[in-house]
């Protein structure tokens, strides 16, 4: 990386893990970006929120869950669409003591939830944006 | 037609799809065909490496050949070529192969590109 301000790359994943290689490609790319000293922010949208599921145990496929956990440990900020996650039963997202309830036993530790407005803010912080999947 | 001109307008494209399987191939390779010379780099990853095979016919793969002939850098992931059983002898002349496509792409995209497209 060129010396100076640390640049940020935003990566959007639209496809579910294990249905195509997009999640694999995004994880490899994010890992490489972190190695090279860039900030990495990831947004999971639609069926891509399944990448946040804890206890994934693929026998032959690339282990997306392990890769997401490793990315978080290395400093990547992984955001997940709250509406997509509520729809798929990962979180309740209901108000509890004036705050939204994002507690879940089904999600990898360190996943952050935000609305589509949070995604727009993420785009504002990014120097470059890469999208993976969708059509 | 000039798709990209001027300093700082380098375009980096990351292609992860096949040339023939999806309906948007015309959009994708239409854009590839209009990149200009060394201002452009095309990276083929995953199923995108299938675009690198020589001997294919049609509008889609002609896009890669056009880009090469205009001086664009085209780079394919050798891991993904091996995974799909494509030997290096079957790759279009001029396409570079590397095991570290992600590393080369991310650095080019972050440091040199004015625009980055992923497909």
Image: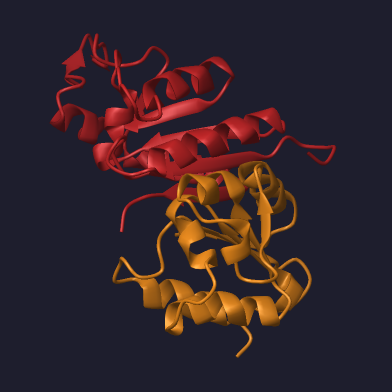
Q: In this orientation, does residue A109 appear?
A: yes
Nearer-the-camera pick, B41 or A111: B41
Residue lying farthest to the bottom in this orientation: B1
Quadrant location, the C terminus of chain B: bottom left
Q: Position of residue B60 (x, y in %)?
A: 44, 78
Residue in the image at 48% along x and 51% along y: B85
Q: Position of residue A20 (x, y in %)?
A: 32, 44
Residue in the image at 31% along x and 66% along y: B21
Residue lying farthest to the right in this orientation: A3
Quadrant location, the N terminus of chain B: bottom right
Whether B51 is drawn above or below B107: the answer is below
Residue B76 quadrant: bottom right
Q: Position of residue A118 (x, y in %)?
A: 40, 37
Chain the render paints red: A
Residue in the image at 43% along x and 36% along y: A24
Residue B73 quadrant: bottom right
Whether B45 is drawn above or below A70: the answer is below
Q: Position of residue B91 (x, y in %)?
A: 59, 65
Q: What color is chain B drawn in?
A: orange
What colour scheme does the image use? by chain
Residue B72 relative to residue B32: left or right: right
Residue A8 quadrant: top right
Q: In this orientation, does residue A112 appear?
A: no
Whether A31 is drawn above or below A135: the answer is above
Residue in the image at 22% along x and 34% along y: A83
Residue B110 relative to residue A58: left or right: right
How many numbered tags mark residues here?
0
């Amino acid at each position: 990386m060129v010396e100076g301000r640390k640049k940020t790359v935003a990566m959007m994943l639209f496809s579910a893990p294990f249905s195509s290689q997009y999640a694999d490609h995004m994880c490899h790319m994010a890992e490489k970006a972190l190695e090279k000293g860039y900030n990495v922010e990831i947004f999971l949208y639609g069926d891509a929120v399944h990448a946040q599921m804890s206890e994934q145990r693929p026998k032959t496929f690339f282990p997306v869950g392990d890769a997401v956990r490793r990315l978080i440990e290395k400093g990547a900020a992984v955001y997940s669409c709250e509406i997509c996650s509520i729809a798929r039963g990962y979180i309740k997202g209901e108000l509890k003591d004036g705050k939204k309830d994002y507690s879940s036993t089904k999600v990898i530790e360190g996943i952050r939830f935000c609305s589509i407005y949070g995604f727009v803010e993420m785009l504002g912080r990014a120097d470059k944006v890469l999208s993976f999947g969708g059509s | 037609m000039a798709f990209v001109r001027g300093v700082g307008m380098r375009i980096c494209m990351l292609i992860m799809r096949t040339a023939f399987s999806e309906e948007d191939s015309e959009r994708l390779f239409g854009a590839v065909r209009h990149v200009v010379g060394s201002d452009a780099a095309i990276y083929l990853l995953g199923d995108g490496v299938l675009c690198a095979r020589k001997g294919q016919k049609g509008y889609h793969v002609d896009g890669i050949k056009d880009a090469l002939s205009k001086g664009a850098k085209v780079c394919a992931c050798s891991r993904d070529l091996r995974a799909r059983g494509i030997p290096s002898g079957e790759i279009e002349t001029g396409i570079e192969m590397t095991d570290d496509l992600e590393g080369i792409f991310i650095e080019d995209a972050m440091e040199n590109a004015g625009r980055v497209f992923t497909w």
